[in-house]
Amino acid sequence: MSIQSELEFDAHLTEEAQQQVGGQVQGRTQWQLTWRRLRSDRVSMIALAVIVIMVLLAILAPAVAGLTHHSVNMAYPVQGENEDGNPVGPGVNGFILGTDSTGRDLLVRVLYGARISLFVGIFTTLIATVLGVSIGLIAGYFGGVIDTLLARFTDAVLAFPYIVLALALAAVYGPSLTIIVVMITFFSWAGIARIVRGQTLSIKEKEYVEAARSLGAGPFRIMFFDILPNLLAPVLVIATLYIPNAVVFEATLSYLGLGVQAPTPSWGNMLSDAQNFYQVAWWYLVFPAAALLITTLAFNLLGDGIRDAMDPRTEKLIAARRLRRRLTRRTINKGNKEALGGVVAGGTAADESGKRG
Amino acid sequence: MAIVGYLIRRLLTGIIVVWLVATITFFLFFARPVYTVARQVAGHAATPQVIQEAINNLGLNQPIMTQYWHFLNGLVHGNLGYSYYTGESVDMMLKQDLPPTISLVIGGMVIWLIVGLSVGIISATRARSVFDRVSSVGVLIGLSMPAFVIGELLIGYVFQPLYSHNIHIFDTGYAGITSGIGPFLQHMILPWITLAAIQAAVYTRLSRGQLLEVLGEDYIRTARAKGLSERTVVFKHAVRAALTPVLSQLGVDMGQLLGGVVVVEAVFGLGGIGQISVEAVDQDNLPVILGFVILAAIFVVIANIVVDLLYAALDPRVRIT
């Protein structure tokens, strides 16, 4: 990129910033900046809205059940099944999304399934995050034997075929929600710990940590008050991206019959039952699958959005996009546009690397 | 000769890992009351005497350490024990059901690597193009979709409609490669696609990100500056450097791959070792589950050694020591 276009670029940014604050310069914390960037990203905001609606629907599932006068595990063989004993379609006899194989209200069951999926997703990620952050901080800060142990253990956990352990656990203790939660937590914290450890290693060499230490702060104060706030950003991103993984894992285990057991509805066990009704009841397969896909997609999109919003390079990216639009309108010479194209490509590069698992 | 020493060391640690996994799984099972297991095996209508007999027959009345010793002794001699139900040797059961699993793993892996890497490379070299955007959407959906949903949708909306119109392009169940390449592909293509779809998404994203990063490096600019063609720059200079992290991800994913195999086998009724172990869980058939766990651990260990060797071959900065 030529120096000239870079200058032009910065000038635009400053100009815009000044316009927005009315000529006055104002301090913003990283979180305010992130939120501001996130808010201007339409996809992330839609994803966030979808998640909020999903959570609300899950919480209000009993209320919805009340409105439809259909309880969750209750079969309605008369209204809910046709002459052949097959499920009735969406909108028939007051079943908004139709019924399932035994004539239960699919809408109510999908919403109750959301409770389990969201609970597993959010709860396990929360515990895994707390565990992973604490262990990662300790390993990164103290180093030595703890660090080596953690590294070995993390490697082992990341390489272990966890569905196999899930099989074994389900065989021993019988399939249950508790096992799912324990399993997912156990296999999630290591990845978070690894990232936190890496960040801690670099942050603990910073001057302000030195300053805190010379003021007499103990190791735990430094870890949790000085280092932790500075690595919350990557942790938030990875946590958001862990939630959909946990949701998928729960659904998979329930699908295999190793998770939530009938008659308690879970998207996984509903889909497992639905596969016998492809021809007669498409809704039975499509609605739980759609609920699952929409939820995981929303979390993935939001996670990507937060990651982009936290990356200061994204600001340039958005600005560059705006600038490019403006430039194209003014039809400025070709050389400049190519230079900007280079910026755009460079800006997205670093953070696309695999954040999954 | 460094490589021989390296291999020996890796194999030794590998054996320790397998032993650990086997031991943990073995002792996990002893949290389960013997009586429940025996009653399940003996059937619903069994009298207490029959159940007691079953316990004796299965050797569950012996002290735990004796059973563990038998188990280890068998393991060393390649004997994984016998099914509680049929008395069939677990070795035989696994051997019989291995072909579908192996076909699934190899075919799925080839597809996912080819699709994942090529889409990733094209997306990176044409960042922000229409292709890139479409593939990003595809990647997100792939990342968000559980394998079994893809499998079910394929069965419900591709296989079934074709089948009911008497178009037999695809088939469920398993037909060995010995029954001809045509039938083999008919049976395997949908499972391969299912297994590959999710992993391909991960690899597309990873290779795209890595390649974009590498393409921003100074030495790439140097390569371009000295007048090399774009093709040479991308394939000779950039891709090789970008692939090494992708390769290490492959080692990490071996564990996940087995999970995917279990799911895909269950969805398509392929009847591989994943499927028999899910059935074994239902029946408390411990030796079969143990056999699968051990086999899985061995697979992960070997796959990781291979990946590390490849890594060293691909990246000159990595030395095997």
Image: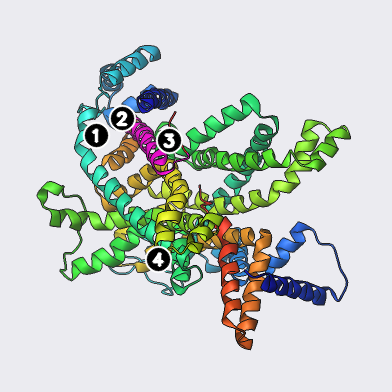
The x, y position of residue B132, in whole percent, is 46, 68
**Badges 3 and 1: C-beta atoms under 8 Å apart?**
no
Q: Name the one closer to the observer, A182 or A319.
A: A319
Give the CA distance from mark 1 to mark 4: 35 Å
Q: Quadrant of residue B68?
A: top left
Discs 1 and 4 share one subunit = no
Cβ–Cβ under 8 Å for marks 3 and 4: no
Amino acid under label 2? Gly
Marks 2, 4 in one chain:
no
Q: Given contact means CB atoms under 8 Å apart, are the residues at marks 1 and 4 in contact?
A: no
Q: Residue at x 21, y 27 (%)?
A: B89
Residue kind at label 4, given as amino acid type: Val
Spot occupied by residue B7 in the image (x, y as percentages of width and height): 36, 27
Earlier along the polypeptide chain: callout 3 or callout 4?
A: 3
Q: Which mark is residue A286?
A: 4
Q: Which residues are magenta?
A: B291-317
* Snapshot quadrant of residue B292: top left
Q: Nearer the viewer, residue A91 or B276?
A: B276
Q: Image point 60% across, 54% down: which residue?
A: A240
Q: Secondary structure at mark 3?
A: helix
Q: A7 or A253: which is nearer to us?
A: A7
Q: Amino acid at mark 1?
A: Leu
> Which residue occupies the extreme bottom position in the image?
A330
Circle 3 sits on which residue?
A: A165
**Does residue B6 appear in the picture of this structure?**
yes
Membership of B295 in magenta stretch? yes
Q: Which residue is located at x 56 percent, y 62 percent?
A: A301
The kind of secondary structure element at disc 4 is helix
Give the secondary structure at mark 1.
helix
Most common SS among magenta residues: helix
Badges 2 and 4: C-beta atoms under 8 Å apart?
no
* Residue marked by disc 1: B94
